[in-house]
Amino acid sequence: MSTSTQSAPATQDVDLGRVGLWSGGLGGLELGRLREVAAEIEELGFGTLWWGEAPGSRETLTQALVLLGATERLVAATGIANLYMRDAAATVAGARTVAALHPGRFVLGLGVSHAPLVEGMLRKDYGKPLATMRAYLDAMDGAPRGTPESREPGPPVLLAALGPKMLELARDRTQGAHPYLVTVEHTAQAREALGPDRLLAVEQGAVLTTDRADGLRRARIHLEMYKVLPNYRNNWLRLGYTEEETTGDLADRLVDALVVIGDEDAIAARVAEHHAAGADHVCLQVLGEKNGDPALDDVRRLGPLTR
């Protein structure tokens, strides 16, 4: 699917591939090992490699350069660049430099993060998400363009959009959306909100095991840090889950909707469900024994899903 749009600024065309990999463990790897892992992920066939950004992590645009320099075809995608970590002019300048060095291989996923992280760790005021994102996009559009690469098409921009208003903003101002920690039902709703011409790249958690009890355990370890964040809980409530299901020990029904647990066929089936619901690209987050574990052995077993 082309990532150019009518109302958003012209951007480079980027092919994300059908299946990508979202990894929360990249920041814990030494740089030499990070390069090796990126090259292996490319060799396994994953079209795009995604990662997050939070206080204390590597600066995300710099990490993109590390990953792109270690690979030949792999697309690097921020999932997401935290807008509170740099001002809009710095984001534009950095993202366009990355895209100019590696044309057609970089996607700028952009998001508002979460109040506990922004206020508790960055010591900044957390604004209303929609108004903050709209103002940031305005500032990006108005940023000075003094370098040659700043006057050429930049990378596609995708918003970390969950609710209907943020999805509408993604539709109207960017190339699409990158919803994180969502269900297949949300994917269908997101496609309807975005319309047919915007890019929809969804994250899907996965535990590769036939031991259901162990799968639920690993999934809950992963979800523990998210269930206290209002942006995610509010989205689950919008999807029809109850207060009881979304607090404390999350209900199995919700865990199963957010994280697919099973063998390769089960994970492939969930990917197919997202595509049938309207996703252009599904980025698997393969969960290991603990948070930050890149789970490379399981990633290797899932490489055939990319074909």
Image: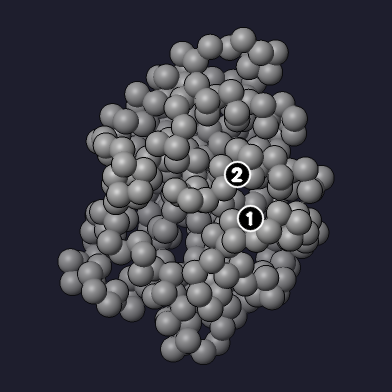
Asked whether residue 41 is in view, the answer is: no
- Give the side of residue 51 with respect to residue 113, left or right: right
- Give the side of residue 132 with respect to residue 213, left or right: left
- Three-letter code for the amino acid on which mark 1 is drawn: Gly
Q: Is residue 87 above or below residue 66?
A: above
Asked whether residue 171 is in view, the answer is: yes
From the top left corner, tell me how far across and down residue 1 is, in percent.
63, 39
Residue tagged by mark 2? 77
- Give the side of residue 276 with respect to residue 166, left or right: right
Q: Is residue 272 above or below residue 108?
A: below
Q: Is residue 19 above or below residue 222?
A: above
Split into 4 quadrants, where in the image is the C terminus? bottom right
- Looking at the rendered structure, the number of numbered marks drawn on it comes to 2
The residue nearer to you, when weighing 186 against 77, is 77
Q: For the residue labelled by badge 1, is the local secondary structure a helix, a strand or a loop?
A: strand
Residue drawn at point x = 54 percent, y = 71 percent: 287
From the top left corner, tell me how far across and down residue 132 is, in percent.
32, 30
Q: Is residue 242 above or below residue 158?
A: below
Q: Nearer the viewer, mark 1 or mark 2?
A: 2
From the top left corner, tell me how far across and down residue 92 is, in percent.
55, 24
Residue drawn at point x = 53 percent, y = 33 percent: 157
Query: What is the quadrant of residue 102 in the picture?
Result: top right
Q: How many angstroms separate mark 1 from mark 2 (CA)?
A: 10 Å
Residue tagged by mark 1? 20
Q: For the residue labelled by badge 2, is the local secondary structure a helix, a strand or a loop?
A: strand
Q: Residue furthest left?
A: 243
Disc 1 packing (10 Å; few <14; some 14–19; many ≥20): many
Q: Earlier in the sequence, mark 1 or mark 2?
A: 1
The colour scheme used here is one colour
From the top left corner, tell me how far across and down residue 208 is, in percent.
58, 78
